[in-house]
Amino acid sequence: MSIKQYGVILLLIASVNLKAQTQTNNSSFLDRTEFKVGYFGNLLWDNGLNFGAEYLWKEKIKIKERKRGEKTITHQLLFNGSMGYSTNFSNKTDNGLSTYLGLIYRRTNLKGRQLSLEINPLGYYRSFLPETYEVKGGNVSKVRFPGRSYYAPSIAIGFGKFRKAKKRSGSYFNLRYTIRTPYNAGALPILSLEYGYRFNFKTKK
Amino acid sequence: MSQKILKIFSILLVVFTLFSCTKESIDLNNLNETIIIRHKNADMPAYVHGNASEKVFLILLHGGPGGTGLQYRLNTIKNQLEENNVVVYFDQRGSGNSQGNYSESDVSVDLMAEDVLALTKVLKAKYGSESRFFLMGHSWGGTLGPATLLKDQSDFMGWINVDGSHDPKGVYDRYRNNFTNVANEQIALENSVSYWNNVLSLVQNVSSDYNDDDFFKMNRESNKAHEILTQDLGLNQENTDVDNGFTYNFFTISWNTTKIQSILIEKGLFKDVSYTNQLSNITIPSLILWGKHDMNVPLSYAYEAYNNLGSNDKELVIFEKSTHSPMFSEPNLFANKVIDFINQHK
């Protein structure tokens, strides 16, 4: 099975999974989901946009008694799905669409400061290439929709700020490490940054 | 709410469409195109710039292995050569922004030479079969160039070797000899005596048989030696201070360089590969350009290339004020020699 087929199947499984959860908990899907949009790239060479969604799967609130009052820490596990496009404007040979699917663990303190750890075993990267010609033997043919597909799992660590009861419910800053494979004769590690805002469409109660 | 989502997606779709639908018109007098050569599971960029009115293409093979094509697009290569003809800056397999999916066992100098021939086929298909080609190799490109021409030189009007090694197998021994000779010369001239004494110690302590560690010790030392010689002998500084730093992702190209070098070295690049005995089979006009004080690929290679190439029409030019990259240290003389050669043989 090619990497392309493998990636498509993984994405389908993930989308079916999210859909199933939506159906069992239909009324609260939007209440449990936050959307995010922001910068995606590494500032110096590749720059782009990222958007996605985080669906709250499990949540545990711990309240500790302290001398100065209660300390509330929220631990969350969220399903993560995001998609980012980045390009290097200095050339036309470093463009691509990244898709990440996985889990986020997030810790939020009383002041709304957040620490996130993200693991996305289901990652897919599609490069977009300019005019491409394939040479096979003595024949040259133009390639339609040139580009390549790579399996691209990633991990990320992030910091953020939660805004309670606001439409724009927070901001985030993530440092992401992705592996694209198989890439050339091995794999290619990629470091990227994400900075953006989360927002929600929760119904007011 | 759903209208809001629809609005956001519509905006993103419009932005994406705008980025993806830009089409540039082709101006043959000032070609500015990027095309990808897909060959044997690799997608390799060719950045095509310059005056294509006569359809004369100079294909530039970068150094390394693992350099980048566009690192050469500066100085007189950009300002003068591109006005005379088209320059094709090629990211070789596993280098620059090349990508693909192939195994280490597939990679070889032979395959990379076939990639270059594939590039000429694409250029002919795109710009017309009347296109004429010159091949220029710098450093490692001087290995890949002969490898390519020995496979098929029929499409090329000329070969330009710039400080390139046709005999990687011999580099190890030549480092030892050249370092010893240059160190003794410089000590006699009382130039940076303590540095050159250290170099003599280094050379005396390396193994007499090839090994990777000692090879890279001397290879790294050659760069340091260039700095010392440039300072002591008043050589020209290499002018590479243009804003090329944003062209390639530094981490990507560093990773690629390490990978492709390790594969080729593992396969015996510096132990087994030599084209010295086959240079006589290269019969197209040849121009050999060399920095007199090159410690990386010593000057003895220039004479050997000149003496062994099979061409009846060949010229050797030595750049008195240069080390390994005369295109950056004596850019005007470099451009003049290359343009004269191309115009004479096109």
Image (cartoon, coloured by chain):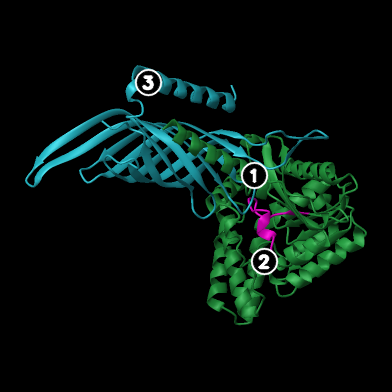
Overall secondary structure of the magenta stretch? loop
Under circle 2, the secondary element is helix
- Indicate the position of residue B268 as horizontal and vertical percent values: 65, 45
Pointer 3: residues within 10 angstroms few (<14), some, or many (20+)? some
- Label 1 – label 3 distance at C-alpha: 41 Å
Residue displayed at 36% across by 43% down: A157
Tell me the number on the disc at residue B178: 2
The hue used for chain A is cyan
Q: In the image, which residues are magenta?
A: B59-74
Under circle 3, the secondary element is helix
Which quadrant would residue A19 be assigned to in this image?
top left
In this rendering, the answer to whether A102 lies above or below B243 is: above
Residue at the disc numbered 1:
B98
Residue at the disc numbered 3:
A21
- Indicate the position of residue A112 as horizontal and vertical percent values: 25, 44
Residue displayed at 65% across by 56% down: B172
- Label 2 – label 1 distance at C-alpha: 35 Å
Amino acid type, mark 2:
Asn
- Indicate the position of residue B233 as horizontal and vertical percent values: 65, 79
- Does label 2 or label 1 sit earlier along the sequence? 1
